Image: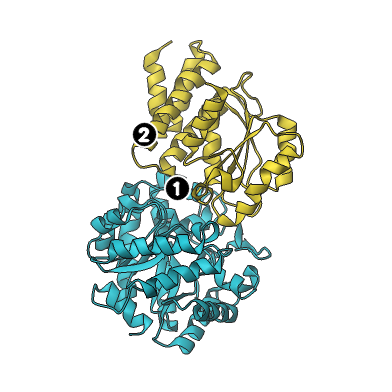
Chain colours: A yellow, B cyan
């Protein structure tokens, strides 16, 4: 493994330089590194460093968006449209619920999860609970992530647990995050975890997966 | 001392009869009057009627014509979705092509465009009813927030990095739109337009970004408002604003909102000569009870008792579903614990 090139990939991912990050990912692929290794040693490491930085310093979305965009470009390069890694750490279904059309937080969670090696099914914004439940039945996730920027969706968030349970999906963990939801306790939202940030949410998921 | 005099005195760190109290009652005024929110946000008469009822019911010191964050972008061509009893949301952005060409956009005529005339009507009605007894607060967005509302927050922020010149051109255009709208509100009778700027929160952008792009434009806007009769410059940036508070004095901010996640001591240290308003958690007005709110209010009043320059308030908008006894508890606290 060419550590120098891996470090360069991490550097450009963190810098948000998609073009250079993709060039290094392609070079590593051509030199025989597996896609899984690129995710594990490149993308995951970059997200780990970004997560640490955002915890220690000021957390801001722009920096994460830029790194996330680079991660997505590298993912597109190594897994062309419509294909997924054969082995993932598990599936997570994410959504912004009906009435909430703000999906920046959800999109950031998606980028971080994908970079960490999870399969993500995105139900989009303004998503009815029924669609979230149907998608969960179809894709068998171990967790559902709900992002919420406005307080008016809180009553809907509280209903998700019962809606999943009614379909025998009691085992699915629910995490909530976003400016509005993170003001509440998990008991108030009837969820398993309230994340302070995307990294906080992913950290919880890593813990329950034992990785 | 009436409410307006109380606020002016507090902003200037002079003696007043008590600490002013300003719950950020926007859509909650509609709920209190049993008016569907979608009707409220589209009609100036209804805004004024509901706001006056809420003022009468609670007895606080300022009244708002804040409805949602889409007034300016709608006036510029964004298409909104008005949903039953909800705030409107953007269905199609004014700048939806990939070039973000603003050459076809013109600064809107505030008397004719979108809901701008309804806001001006509401302000005018409030002025006729309240004159100079109560602070009448209009509202404009900050330049970055309007820019994000013109093309979507992700696209706007990527544009700032990928094509900074085009981004700055957009910011300048936004600044002009906002300045015109703010001045129209002052002419209609607002004592000031609060500048509501959620996209400029350090939760979204680094403070260096704020310093480079937003700072000079806010400064220019506030200067124009003050020069045209605004009694004070009020900046509202929610979230963890700690890292940008030190810039506020130079921008010309006279009243700084601080959210629940900013410690009062941090705000006081960053802005020793600026009036602060905050910072009870918005969601507490739904989740907590009147005793909790009374206790949180009392604690804030104690914290600021020696310093002055403080307006008791929520950290951000009071949700429309809030318990009215909680809002009343905050107002009572300001009146009881002088």
Residue A194 placement (x, y as % from top left): 53, 41
Q: Is residue B224 left or right of residue A13?
A: left
Q: Is residue B112 left or right of residue B170?
A: right
Cα separation between marks 2 and 1: 20 Å
| Residue at the outermost front position | B291
| Residue at the outermost right position | A167
Share a chain, discs 2 and 1?
no
Question: What residue lies at 39% left-to-right and 37% top-to-bottom?
Answer: A54
**Residue located beneath label 2 in the image:** A53
Q: Is residue B64 left or right of residue B38?
A: left
**Residue located beneath label 1 in the image:** B157
Asked if one can make out residue A36 in the rendered structure from this viewpoint, the answer is: yes
Residue A53 placement (x, y as % from top left): 36, 34
Q: Is residue B129 above or below residue B309?
A: below
Residue A89 or residue A115, whichever sits in front: A89
Residue B230 placement (x, y as % from top left): 34, 77
Residue B14 or residue B76, whichever sits in front: B14
- The residue carrying pointer 2 sits among few (fewer than 14), some (14 to 19) or many (20 or more) residues within 10 Å by Cα, namely few
Give the quadrant of the N terminus of chain B: bottom left
| Badge 2: chain ID | A
Residue A10 placement (x, y as % from top left): 41, 25
Label tally: 2
| Badge 1: chain ID | B
Quadrant of residue B10 in the image? Answer: bottom left
Question: What residue lies at 70% left-to-right and 34% top-to-bottom?
Answer: A170
- What is the secondary structure assignment of the residue under circle 2? helix
């Amino acid at each position: 493994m060419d550590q120098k090139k891996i470090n360069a990939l991490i550097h450009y991912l963190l810098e948000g330089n998609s073009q250079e990050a993709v060039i290094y990912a392609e070079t590593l692929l051509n030199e025989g590194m597996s896609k899984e290794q690129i995710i594990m040693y490149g993308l995951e490491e970059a997200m780990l460093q970004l997560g640490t930085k955002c915890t220690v310093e000021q957390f801001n979305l722009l920096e994460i968006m830029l790194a996330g965009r680079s991660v997505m470009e590298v993912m597109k390069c190594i897994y062309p449209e419509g294909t997924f890694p054969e082995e993932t750490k598990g599936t997570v279904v994410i959504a912004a619920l009906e009435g909430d059309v703000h999906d920046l937080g959800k999109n950031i969670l998606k980028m971080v999860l994908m970079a960490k090696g999870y399969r993500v099914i995105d139900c989009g914004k303004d998503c009815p609970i029924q669609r979230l439940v149907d998608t969960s039945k179809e894709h068998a996730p171990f967790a559902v992530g709900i992002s919420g920027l406005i307080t008016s969706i809180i009553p809907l968030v509280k209903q998700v647990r019962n809606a999943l349970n009614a379909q025998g999906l009691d085992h699915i963990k629910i995490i909530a995050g976003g400016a509005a939801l993170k003001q509440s306790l998990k008991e108030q939202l009837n969820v398993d975890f309230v994340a302070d940030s995307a990294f906080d949410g992913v950290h919880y998921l890593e813990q329950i997966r034992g990785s | 001392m009436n409410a307006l005099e109380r606020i002016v005195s507090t902003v200037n760190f002079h003696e007043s009869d008590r600490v002013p109290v300003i719950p950020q009652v926007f859509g909650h005024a509609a709920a209190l009057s049993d008016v569907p929110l979608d009707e409220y946000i589209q009609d100036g008469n209804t805004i004024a009627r509901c706001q006056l009822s809420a003022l009468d019911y609670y007895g606080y010191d300022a009244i708002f014509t804040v409805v949602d964050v889409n007034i300016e972008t709608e006036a510029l061509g964004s298409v909104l979705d008005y949903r039953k009893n909800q705030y409107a949301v953007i269905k199609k952005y004014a700048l939806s092509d990939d070039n973000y060409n603003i050459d076809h956009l013109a600064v809107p005529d505030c008397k004719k465009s979108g809901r701008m005339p309804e806001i001006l009507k509401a302000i005018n009605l409030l002025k006729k009813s309240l004159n100079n007894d109560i602070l009448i607060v209009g509202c404009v967005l900050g330049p970055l927030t309007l820019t994000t509302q013109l093309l979507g927050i992700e696209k706007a922020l990527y544009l700032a990095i990928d094509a900074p010149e085009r981004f700055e051109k957009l910011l300048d255009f936004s600044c002009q739109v906002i300045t015109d709208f703010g001045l129209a509100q002052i002419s209609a009778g607002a004592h000031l337009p609060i500048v509501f700027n959620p996209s400029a929160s350090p939760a979204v952008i680094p403070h260096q970004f704020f310093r480079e792009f937003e700072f000079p434009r806010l400064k220019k806007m506030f200067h124009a408002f003050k020069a045209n009769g605004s009694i004070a410059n009020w900046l509202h940036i929610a979230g963890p604003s700690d890292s940008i508070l030190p810039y506020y004095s130079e921008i010309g901010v006279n009243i700084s909102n601080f959210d629940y996640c900013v410690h009062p001591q941090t705000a006081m240290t960053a802005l020793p000569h600026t009036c602060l308003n905050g910072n009870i958690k918005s969601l507490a007005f739904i989740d907590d009870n009147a005793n909790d709110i009374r206790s949180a209010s009392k604690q804030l009043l104690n914290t600021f008792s020696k310093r002055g320059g403080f307006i008791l308030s929520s950290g951000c908008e009071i949700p429309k579903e809030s318990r009215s006894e909680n809002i009343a508890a905050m107002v009572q606290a300001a009146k009881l614990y002088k």
